[in-house]
Image: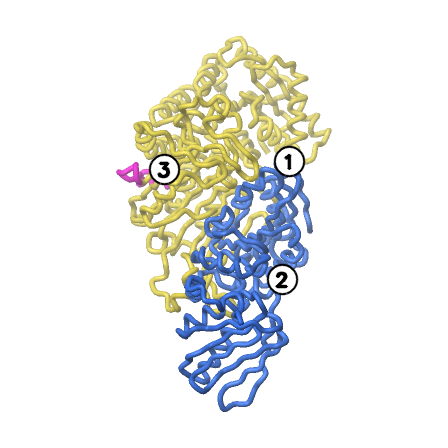
Chain colours: A blue, B yellow
Amino acid sequence: MIVQLTDTNAAALQEQLGQLRHRLGGISGVVFTLVVVVDQGDYDRAMAAVVDTALEHPSRILLVTNGRARADRLDASIRAGEDAPGEIVTLKFHGELRKHRDSVVLPLLLPDLPVIVWWSGCSPVAPASDQLGRLGTRRITDAMGDPDPLAALEVRARNYCPGDTDLTWTRLTRWRGLLAAALDAYPMNVTRATVGAAPDNAAASLLAAWLGDRLNVGVAVTRHPGVGITEVTLGAETDEIRVARTDGNLAVISAPGLPERLVALPRRDLNTLLTEELRRMDDDPIYAEAMAALVRRLDRATPQIGGARK
Amino acid sequence: MAGPSALVLFGVTGDLARKKLLPAIYDLANRGMLPPGFGLVGFARRDWAAEHFADVVADAVRSHARTPFREDVWRQLVAGVRFVSGELDDDAAFEELKRTLAELDETQGTGGNHAFYLSVPPAAFDITVAQLRRHGLADRPRGSWRRVVIEKPFGHDLASAQELERKLAKAFEPTSVFRIDHYLGKETVQNLLAFRFANTMFEPIWNRNYIDHVQITMAEDIGIEGRAGYYDGIGAARDVIQNHLLQLLALTAMEEPTSFGADELSAEKRKVLAAASTPADLGAHTARGQYAAGWAGGRLVAGYLEEKGIPADSHTDTFAAIRVDIDNRRWAGVPFYLRAGKRLPRRVTEVALNLRTAPHLPFDHADVRSLGNNALVLRIQPEEGITLRFGAKVPATSELREVNMEFGYDTSFVESSPEAYERLLLDVLRGAEPLFPQPAEVELSWRLLDPVLDHWASQEEPPQAYPSGTWGPTSAVEMLARDGFSWRRP
């Protein structure tokens, strides 16, 4: 059921949500409120992602977007009992009200449950002190949604607060798992490491920072043709572990004394990344360390950042 | 069904009468709960003819009644509708009222039974009761009854409450006085009693061994809505903490009554209220605030001091929070935090019992970081129901997280609860023993609150401002932080 409301306010929305709950037989078992800050142009992509997410995490989802009307007005639509459990509320703010979006979002947060704020595109410089970000226990950004992902990731790293996560980090989950497992299986004293990636790949910078921090080695980022991260090598004096992914899907892993093997390492879509990120409600200390390492790397201003200069 | 009777509504032009009382009377008639011999007399200062008043009633019914408008029901009702015009100090008007009631007894067969509903500002209670007494309207001929209904607040401190009681007692018998807290319908009281005393599983944890602290919240998203004359000088503590929230506290904390008779129930409420006290350091354990201009729920709203009719230097609290301790075996060491406020983010009334942390958590520290305490929340309104909050493991991870289990009266029982006023008016007309506050409870509540009000009155500082649409002043947050707690987001 989709209910449209024009020139409305939080109290009227609350009333409408109550009636829908009554009519649809109650919505029990919701686990959090997800606030999605989205640009109008990105709306369909964000909506698709949250509908997917709602299948794993029934929740109240508030899509916050700006409209172009001059009047100080809020238009809204509520979608419940359609294609996903929970409630999806789209809030479109016009005029002066665009500066006071928190005044509508705050009353609509579910009692007591965690609040996650996700910026699907550009995100504020300091999410934790942002007007909407302040309402959240978790704040999810996506540097890849920014026109300049590397610069965006740097801003994220320099303004990190516990509870922040960037989806760039989530994109690395499989890579990190694979590399950690490889080192467990072939323990070696790593003295050199490289990350190869498409030019200006933010995930590659973060992976390099994480590897450098965990292994205490310098990590060079090299420019490779292909999509996303294409290759990671971890080397000791003579031995080397190498994971290469040329097509963005299937990786080849090679280690000393073993045949090359294939491992599925697909680039994952936004919906999957978001769903994974919502499994944890606490802050991530490993991410915090990786971001701190990224800041140190940037401060050293090593020429590797932003692609190798040859 | 009620017996033959006439109901006199003072202040019939007010919002309450139009939106609640008149529609409730119609709904009762429509459900067949009013006798054929029923009369309704409006009393107000307007210069209206009886026919015009009937139109006003019809309008109110059409816009606000919960049951459909039926011509036959209306014709039955309108035959007994009368109007008396006059001021409350106007002797002629009360003589006219007396004649009107006599005429109704004669023509409608209302049997000499009269109920007086005082839907007037508290300041007008005295004069209205005195006038009823002076003109013999409170005198009860043999075989008939007189009843009076008053709405909170019952006085503005202990002394004035006692004075009001004395005046009421001069005119009416104690069992004929119905004190109404319209926020706390009879259904709600009965629901709470059923939840506590019809179940086995809650009683064992309903004490200091398991409960850490209790938060009772009544939040309104509206401001004073033009009721400056009523609200200024009263404030949130007198308006709702004294009656509504302390009644909720009493019902939550009291022992099991020996029966649900009005006396037995009141006895338990009195015991727990007598054991309740506020801390000695009132500066540290109370907080008060006043709403400032701001964006609330998507609308720009004025601050309290900018509201029409409010003096620029008013110290009236539109937000009040107090800590109450109950010195008995069940509750020693369990603080009860009560807060009430206007222009908060949303309209909600609830009692939240927060349980202690598990004595030992045999889990990885990282997995239980986002796990809070168990809680049992009794939601009073809107969407009356129960929420049980507990920890559960998130599938496919080892993390533990809080989840909510919900029960809603309106989703589990399709039959909607009768409107609070319908129940109430019917109880008045039937003379059913009220579940509403008895004078001794009112006095005990004032005894508890008076020191807080005196403390606040002694402060030169005005209440702390809070932006409209937020959860109150920072001093309220600090007040709980001092005890190591934080307010839940209701």
Q: Which residue is mark 3?
A: B287
Residue under pointer 1: A71
Q: x, y (%) of residue B10?
A: 53, 20
Subunit under mark 2: A
Q: Give SS at disc 1.
A: loop
Numbered range of the magenta stretch:
B266-284
Decide if residue B79 is in sight here. no
The majority secondary structure of the magenta stretch comes to helix
Residue at position x 49%, y 82% in the image:
A241
Kindly report which numbered mark, 1 or 3, lies closer to the viewer in this rendering.
1
Q: Do badges 2 and 3 share one subunit?
A: no
Magenta-colored stretch includes residue B276: yes
Chain designation of label 3: B
Q: Amino acid at mark 3?
A: Ala
Tag in front: 2 or 3: 2
Amino acid at circle 1: Ala
Is residue B210 shown to the viewer in this render? yes
